[in-house]
Image (cartoon, grey):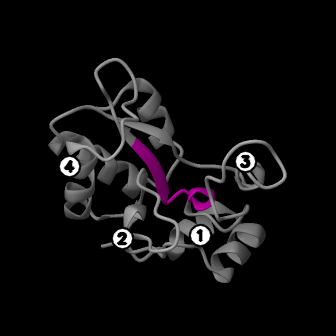
Amino acid sequence: MLNAHSIEKLAEVHPELARRVKQLAEILSFDLVVTCGLRTWAEQDALFDQGRTQPGSIVTKAPGGHSAHNFGYAVDVAPSDGVGIDWSGKDAKWNEILSKAPSCGLNEGAMWRTFPDEPHLYLQECPANPDDTMRWDFQEKGMPAVWASFKLS
């Protein structure tokens, strides 16, 4: 099950990603929360600056234009504890997300070697990191051109 906030976040991302995340939510034994979907390049830069030039810990290695969130093909999720978000860590709920996501056509950032990102899910057919062509398409033609380039099964 997804809450209203999660549905709003999914309305901003690629429709196929939204469909797959909803499919995942239906097969989980608990409620799923979408904590982040589409991010602007400026929002991504602000996250990138965290722990570097701004207070806080480092949460991303991707500056603006280098995150799948900037192109609407990634979301961050978390299990719900029934009241809010369950940030307790690597427990049975998190393991269930990671084990069932691939059956819904979603890759997860937890498998990244250098900077694992457990809450990060993205379309299997898309690269973990956007490439120069995607950035050019976005800047020259907009998001519809980027989404049209996805080869989704």
Q: CA distance from mark 3 to mark 2?
A: 24 Å
Pair 4/2: label in front = 4
Task: Look at discs 1 and 3 and give the one toward the viewer.
Answer: 3
At label 3, which amino acid type do we have? Glu
What residue type is disc 4 on? Glu
First along the sequence among labels 1 and 4: 4
Instruction: Determine the CA span between mark 3 and mark 4.
Output: 29 Å
Q: Position of residue 9 (x, y in %)?
A: 50, 38
Distance (Cα) linking label 4 and label 2: 18 Å
Q: Please, what is the three-letter code of the amino acid marked with disc 1? A: Val
Q: Residues within 10 Å of mark 2 (few under 14, many from 20)?
A: some
Q: Secondary structure at mark 1?
A: helix
Q: CB atoms at circles 1 and 3 under 8 Å apart?
A: no
- Please give the range of residues in magenta: 69-77
Identify residue for label 3. 43
Q: Give yes or no for contact between labels 2 and 1 (Cβ–Cβ under 8 Å).
A: no
Q: Is residue 62 left or right of residue 97?
A: right
**Residue 125 falls within the magenta-colored stretch:** no
Which residue was labeled with disc 1?
Answer: 146
Classify the position of the C terminus by image quarter: bottom left
Q: Position of residue 139 (x, y in %)?
A: 76, 68
Check disc 4 and report the residue beneath it: 96
